[in-house]
Image (cartoon, rainbow, N blue to C red):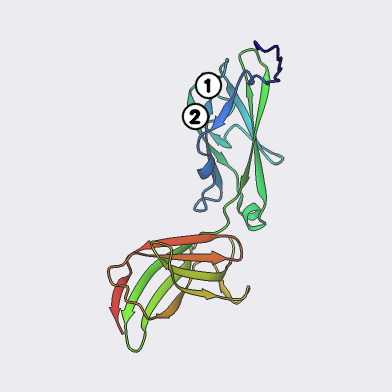
Amino acid sequence: LKQDINQSFQVTTPPPVILKLVNEDSVFDLKDKNHFNITIQNHRSSLEALNITKIQVDHVVLNGNFTNPELPLHSYLSPGEVLPIICNYTWEEDAKNNKNLTIIIYAITNETEEYQFKFTFTLPRAELNVTSVEFIEAEPLNNLKVTIENLPYSTIDLTITKITVSFENGTQICVKEWFPGFMILAPNESCNISFEIDKRLVDMNITVTITTEEGIEFIWSGIPSTGNA
């Protein structure tokens, strides 16, 4: 600087090739526990094309007819090019045991230099759904009935610990809480939760938030259907 101040900085240059995972949030689908799907991109800033040779999950190597397309690839992935790969791997037990899975993608360049790209995933274990929310006008108090389902393809039971009903602005209408272990829904099982309320919820948007002991949450927003007492 003009004021005779010197300052040095240390920087790290990017690697010569970068492999990006395009669908990081949708690699594993509870509806298909015998496969997973990765969509990769040889990053635009990569200096070389890549050939994907194999994929490793824990200690299991996936190539040949365990992947579609089969690995190693018959052609190289140019910088910027995207490729989806379907992998045959049963991960249901890993999900039940709440185990994280690490996927390593092996690739080589035209210069036959090998690279490894590692990605770690928290597996989905279960999914909740609110199948109906019904407002019933009655005396002396109105009633709100919420039907909750642990979806059939879930891998574990879900323990409902709290349900909150609120207006769009966040104002709570009613809350119900249960001790852990009291309200358990197995996969494909549903239950009805009823709230007595002193408000009229006709043509009003509300939000229903369901919390479970397992850390799985579901939020429903909309206008309740109406029924008769």
| Residue 162: image location, x then y, percent | 54, 70
Decide: is 34 above or below 135: above
Q: Which residue is mark 1?
A: 77
Front in this rendered view, residue 177 or 49: 177
Q: Are marks 1 and 2 in contact (CB under 8 Å)?
A: yes
Residue 223 sits in quarter: bottom left
- Position of 154 with respect to 202 (left or right) is right
| Residue 51: image location, x then y, percent | 58, 22
Q: Which residue is mark 2?
A: 83
- Mark 2: amino acid: Leu
Secondary structure at badge 2 equals strand
Front in this rendered view, residue 68 or 183: 183
| Residue 78: image location, x then y, percent | 51, 18
Q: Mark 2 or mark 1, which is nearer the start of the sequence?
A: 1
- Position of 2 with respect to 185 (left or right) is right
Q: Which mark is residue 179?
A: none
Mark pair 1, 2: CA separation: 8 Å
Q: Quadrant of the C terminus?
A: bottom left
Q: Quadrant of the N terminus?
A: top right
Residue 101 sits in quarter: top right
- Mark 1: amino acid: Leu
Q: Within 10 Å of the Cα at label 1, are there few (<14), some (14-19), or many (20+) other Cα atoms? A: many
- Position of 229 with respect to 172 (left or right) is left
